[in-house]
Amino acid sequence: MSLFVEALPKELVNLFSEYIDRIVKTSKTFSDGVKLLNEFRVGEARDKLAEASRLEAEADEIRKKLIALLEASRIDPGFKEDFFHMIKRMDDIADWFKEAARDLLIIPYLETPQPIREGLEKMIKLTVKASEVIAEAVKHALQGDYEGAEKLIKEVEVLEEEVDQINMENRGKLLELSDQIKPYTLAILLHDFNQDLEEAADACEYAGDYLRALLIAWKPM
């Protein structure tokens, strides 16, 4: 039997699963927007990026319902507090994808030097993958597959390390190619976008760390 199923009302478990799915949909929709940009389908890309922001808003509404259900539930106060923080860790992932989508709506992305775009797209691919993997880790935990969850948490850690390395490379490219970036404010926007992606990957790792701690503290013996 799953720790979550044992400790939480069924309605709350189902809503949490829906919440996780909405976060992943946010990250995938953001990624689809970038792909459309690279195909020069700018109008469709902007629609996708705007949709990613809307999906994050929907996820936030689900989060509020989750918190209300959690507060009303009669469960161990310590577990309730820890589960609240787990929800917050997942919320951070969606928040950073929303910020990345918003930044990309104002960045003239196709005017960005190709080496920088390539680096950013590597980060996007890895960060979206990290969001998918941490979502799978949570689902494994919900089903009581704690070994499977731990394996996926470790995969998220590897992905975050790769993102961290590419983040440093991208910052170097921004300096190296600064004379090709016009106007100069574009370099600031690109740096912020790069940082959004780094923060999203970090948020996935933090969620994994917290899920691991939650399972260690509360897993049935």
Image: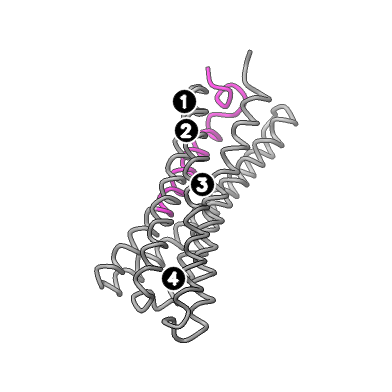
- List x then y, in percent, for residue 203: 57, 49
Q: What residue is disc 3 on?
A: 160
Vertically, is 66 above or below 60?
Answer: above
Disc 2 to disc 4: CB gap under 8 Å: no
- List x then y, in percent, for residue 130: 46, 45
The residues colored magenta run: 1-27
Dot 4 amino acid type:
Leu
| Residue plotted at (43% across, 56% down) | 123
Disc 3 to disc 4: CB gap under 8 Å: no
Q: Nearer the viewer, residue 188 or 169?
A: 169
Vertically, is 145 above or below 165?
Answer: above
Q: Is residue 46 shown left or right of residue 83?
A: left
Disc 2 to disc 1: CB gap under 8 Å: yes
Q: Quadrant of the C terminus?
A: top right
Q: Is residue 101 shown left or right of residue 90?
A: left
Q: Nearer the viewer, residue 30 or 200?
A: 200
